[in-house]
Image (cartoon, rainbow, N blue to C red):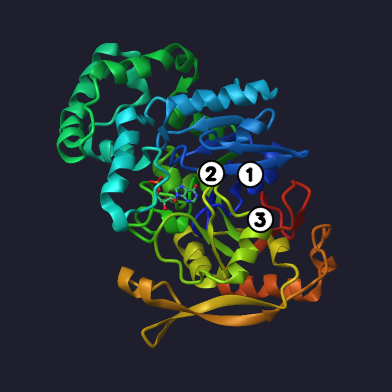
Amino acid sequence: MPAIVLVGAQWGDEGKGKATDLLGSSVDFVVKFNGGNNAGHTIVIEGERYALHLLPSGILTPGCTPVIANGVVIDLGVLFQELDDLQARGVDTSRLVVSANAHLIASYNRVLDKVGERFLGSRRLGTTGRGIGPTYADKMSRVGIRVQDVFDEGILRQKIEGALENKNQALVKIYNRRAIAVDEVLEEFLTYADRLRPMVRDTGLLLSQALDAGKTVLLEAGQATLLDVDHGTYPFVTSSNAVSAGACTGSGIPPTRVDRVIAVLKAYSTRVGEGPFPTELHDDSGEYLRKTGMEYGTTTGRPRRCGWVDTVVGRYAARVNGVTDFVLTKLDVLTGLDRVPVAVAYDVDGVRHDEMPMTQTEFHHAVPVYESLDGWWEDISDCRSFEDRPANARRYVERVEELVGARISVIGVGPGREATISRHPLLES
Ligand code: IMP
């Protein structure tokens, strides 16, 4: 006890790293349970900026055990590059544990992700091109390569041969690319075998024993609610379950052991890649949010699409994740605006929707219904208590809280760990 799940409430990049960092030394295990190196956390500790793509953010907390669980897809080249970079900056990475059942991203998956997107043309998804989708597709098609396979060369070769049989046909005949040799893929995986072996564990068992022993386990989602393959804006989604329920299948911890679900909600909205985004701004206000909020992808450097906060999305996230606490991030970015619009519902072809529309077509037609709140000009980045804040900034938080239907326990007012207002403790009820 306790197991805490941390998810993103919108389309990712809400600042989950900050919430993890805040829980900091109270957490014994930080578990990544979905996604791969398509994620990107930027964490600022004592002025040092760390950008992590694959490693759980707990890797930066002394005494915490970071876990890459079974639901993750791993690019071994990226894993060891991130470890080398952190070690070069003096971070102790020796506690990292990796599930034997996690799937591996093979070079052919990266190639297929990129050529697949090119082939889709205007119907592309805007993936990160890291091979995530094709690797999850292999997992579901039961031709995936898992961490444990790297330690049995005979099995590994058989599995690569099996996977490449169809893929080489597709690469050559459909995409006009060269075929990939079995030995090339085999060699790449085997290069890492010795370094990987000591990290590999039955992570489901490890985490269950940790909970039995009274340890605190934080299960940290990659991506976010509306990028979830089942509950997001399909098909413009990632290929894994990024909602709180994914924490269970992705780690082996059962739902009955989860005590708390924290969702991170940015004070405005952003999205990278394609897909519907009702509150997106194509004007100066959007540019203002992008510049002030420094909204450029951690993983790909792409400028993020920006818009006002959408409480229909927030409400939906509260419902599908069973959110107990919201962490509202980047409120300081909204300082200096005359009016701050908040989307409260959608107009879909003349019909008001207070909840997420049922179909993709309706969501594509959704026009936000805004409530326009008064802005504030006072610098809030030094505020440490809710009461200290300008009345209009307080009203903004209280109105968003009312609309999303779950309490906002923590408010971020700047990039550093200290730039935070705590209203309710995240670790106690
Ligand atoms: P994939 O995960 O690379 O397959 O990309 C699928 C969609 O999810 C694309 O729209 C990506 O831009 C988006 N996506 C994937 N990971 C992240 C993330 O960490 N933050 C924001 N968007 C993401």
Q: How crowded is mark 2: few (under 14 residues within 10 Å), some or many (20 or more)?
A: many
Mark 1 or 3, nearer chain start: 1
Q: Is mark 1 on a helix, strand or loop?
A: helix
**Residue with the mark numbered 3:** 429
Say which residue label 2 marks: 220
The answer to which of marks 1 and 2 sits earlier in the sequence is 1
Q: Position of residue 141 (x, y in %)?
A: 22, 38
Q: Which of marks 1 and 3 is in front?
A: 1
Could you tell me the amino acid type at mark 1? Thr
The answer to whether residue 426 is above or below residue 145 is below
Identify the residue under disc 1: 20
Quarter of the rendering containing residue 398 = bottom right
Q: Are marks 3 and 2 in contact (CB under 8 Å)?
A: no
The reply to whether residue 378 is in sight is: yes
* Amino acid type for the residue under numbered disc 2: Glu
Q: Regarding mark 3 in the picture, which secondary structure is present there?
A: loop
Q: Which residue is drawn at 44% across and 59% down?
A: 226
